[in-house]
Image (cartoon, helix red, strand yellow):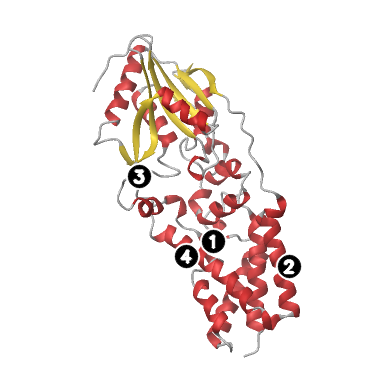
Amino acid sequence: MSQKLSPEAEISILTCDPGEELYSLFGHSAIRVQDPISNMDLVFNYGTFDFSTPNFYMKFAQGRLDYLLSVSDYERFITSYKREKRSVYSQKLLLNPQQKQQLFEALLINYKPENRAYKYDFFMDNCATRIDEIIRNNIAGDWEFTQVPSKLGETYRTGIAPYLANSDWLNLGLNIVLGAPTDHLQKGLFLPDILKDNYTDATLNGKPIVANTRTLYDAQFVYSKTAFLLSPVFIFYLAAFLILLGSIFIPEKMHFADFILFFALGIAGSIIAFLWFAADHTATNDNWNIFWALPTHFIMAFVILFQHQKSKFTHYYFLVTLIIVCTLLIFMVFPQLFSIFNYAPLAFPFEMIIPILLCIIFRSLGIVRKKS
């Protein structure tokens, strides 16, 4: 399918605010093509997928799910964001008729069934990077951006940190499963807001590329912050304090507490290992959090629960665990720093991890000191 755009046609970048669901947490980008002469108003959306895909959830978890470029009517698109109370902004691109036609035709080619699917990558290939790529690949010239995150020393972790500020548990969970690539300098405009901000001041052959930025829908949404008493910082420090008291005053009755602690750590370690070795997500590779969340803790949790006498293996296992975690805590050599000394992950939630490490130290020491 092909269509000639009129001189009155407009092409805009749409940026949508984050939502409360995980899939919408970092916002969204799309391209709008309007032509009042032909009464066309379409939105090209790189962030859709087919729920009927066989083994949908397994492919999603493994990073092997095909994402799709879809096309919808603008009114349908904007209605969905109004329903979710997510603000939508528009940036009209200053293009001549030939450039508009060239970009529109590139979008149509990309929408062909044999071209529309792609392997989503959180950092390198998503709704924002695809839009930047198709615009710059089809509008030739001398492009200049002033807010490129890599020039400002921004890592991927510092880039996503503001979006996690209102959800402490999600902040903790994502930072645990995201590996060392998260602490590399950003390459490309990987977030919708970064795309929007860079195009606001971008120039093409020395001239602005964006005419203006308009608010199409203002949700005025207020995000709720996690209550302190329900936050992981409070709960984990409380747990560490109670575990310390139990280790001092009732060490012989800590079997069940040990089971819960190391069972949870083993589950976390198994998830880390799965996402690192059995999935295609580049963001979860080289995840050195596995040093304190060892998958083998899952097995040792049951050993502790049912073993009446301490074996030599148990003694040395938790002695090694104690040494590793003490090293992490005393020298502040937090796992992701092993491979990225040049880019310290300042956004890593140390305050949430420290009490977990303290719990591991208290109980590992208690098990090591336990009499056979």
Q: Are marks 2 and 3 in contact (CB under 8 Å)?
A: no
Give the mark toward the camera: 3 or 4: 3
Q: Nearer the viewer, mark 2 or mark 3?
A: 3
What count of labels does the image hold?
A: 4
Residue drawn at point x = 58 percent, y = 25 percent: 218
**Contact check, label 3 and label 4, Cβ < 8 Å:** no
Residue identifier under label 3: 51
**Neighbour tally class for label 1: few under 14, some 14-19, many 20 plus, Cα within 10 Å:** many
Helix, strand or loop at mark 1 = helix
Which sits in the foreground, 23 or 80?
Answer: 80
Q: Is residue 83 left or right of residue 33?
A: right
> On the picture, is 227 further left or further right than 325?
right
Query: Residue 128, located in which quarter of the rendered image?
Result: top left
Q: Amino acid at mark 3?
A: Phe
Q: Which residue is mark 2?
A: 241
Q: Position of residue 287 (x, y in %)?
A: 49, 58
Quadrant of the frame with the C terminus: bottom right
Residue 69 visible, this angle: yes
Type of amino acid at the residue the image marks with label 1: Asn
Residue 289: image tag: 1
* C-alpha separation, residue under disc 4 versus residue under disc 1: 11 Å
The residue beneath circle 4 is 270
